[in-house]
Image (cartoon, rainbow, N blue to C red):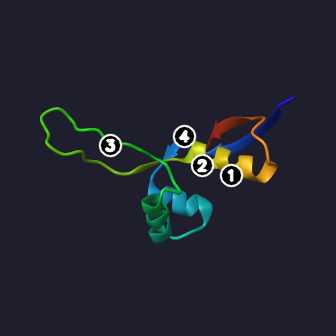
Amino acid sequence: MAETISINIPREWVYPEEFAQLEGMSVHTVYKWKEKGKLEIIPKSIAPGKSRAGGRIRIKYAKYKSQQMREILGHSNFTLNIAAVH
C-alpha cells in the first residue's frame, strides 16, 4: 500500500529566491546546484518575434521534494499531495 505524504509548498515550481527561503540556504547555493544539475528547471521558451529566451529561472520544486522523500523513505511507493500555501 502506498504511503500518502502531504506537504505545503507555494506551487509546483518556484523561483530561486523562494527556493532559498524555503530550504534555508543562500541564493548563490541555489544557482550553484542548478549549474551542477542537482536542481531541475523549467526550460525557457522563445517568445514570438524575439531572438532569445528570456524570463526568470523556475525550479521544479515538487519534483525536488519527491526526490527528497524517495531518498528518505528508501522507496518510491508513495503519493505526494501538494497543498498550496497562499
Q: Are marks 4 and 2 in contact (CB under 8 Å)?
A: no
- CA gap between label 4 and label 2 equals 10 Å
Q: Name the residue beneath numbered marker 3.
A: 44
Residue 63 horizontal side relative to residue 3, left or right: left
The Cα–Cα distance between marks 1 and 2, rounded to whole angstroms, is: 6 Å
4 vs 2, front mark: 2
Establish if 39 lies above or below 44.
Answer: below
Callout 4: helix, strand or loop? loop
Q: Looking at the picture, which amino acid does disc 2 mark?
A: Tyr
Residue wearing tag 4: 12
Q: The N terminus lies in which quarter of the figure?
A: top right
| Circle 2 residue | 64
Look at discs 4 and 1 and give the one toward the viewer: 1
Structural crowding at the residue carrying mark 3, measured as other residues with C-alpha within 10 Å and reported as few (<14), some (14–19) or many (≥20) = few
- Return the disc, 2 or 3, that comes first in the chain's sequence: 3
Q: How crowded is mark 2: few (under 14 residues within 10 Å), some or many (20 or more)?
A: some
Q: How far apart are marks 4 and 1 (CA)?
A: 15 Å
> For the residue carrying disc 4, how many other residues have a C-alpha within 10 Å: few (<14), some (14-19), or many (20+)?
some
Query: Looking at the image, can residue 86 be seen?
Result: no
Q: Where is residue 55 in the image (x, y as percent from the top left)?
A: 29, 48
Quadrant containing the C terminus is: top right
The answer to whether residue 17 is left or right of residue 44 is right
Q: What residue type is labelled 1?
A: Gln
Residue 68's tag is 1
Of the image marks 4 and 2, the number of the one nearer the N terminus? 4
Q: Nearest the camera: 73 or 18?
A: 73
Along the viewing direction, whichever of 58 and 1 lies nearer the viewer: 1
Residue contact at pointers 1 and 2, CB within 8 angstroms: yes
Give me the residue at 38% from left, 51% from top: 57
Q: In whole angstroms, how far apart are the C-alphas of marks 2 and 3? A: 19 Å
The answer to whether one can see residue 43 in this image is yes
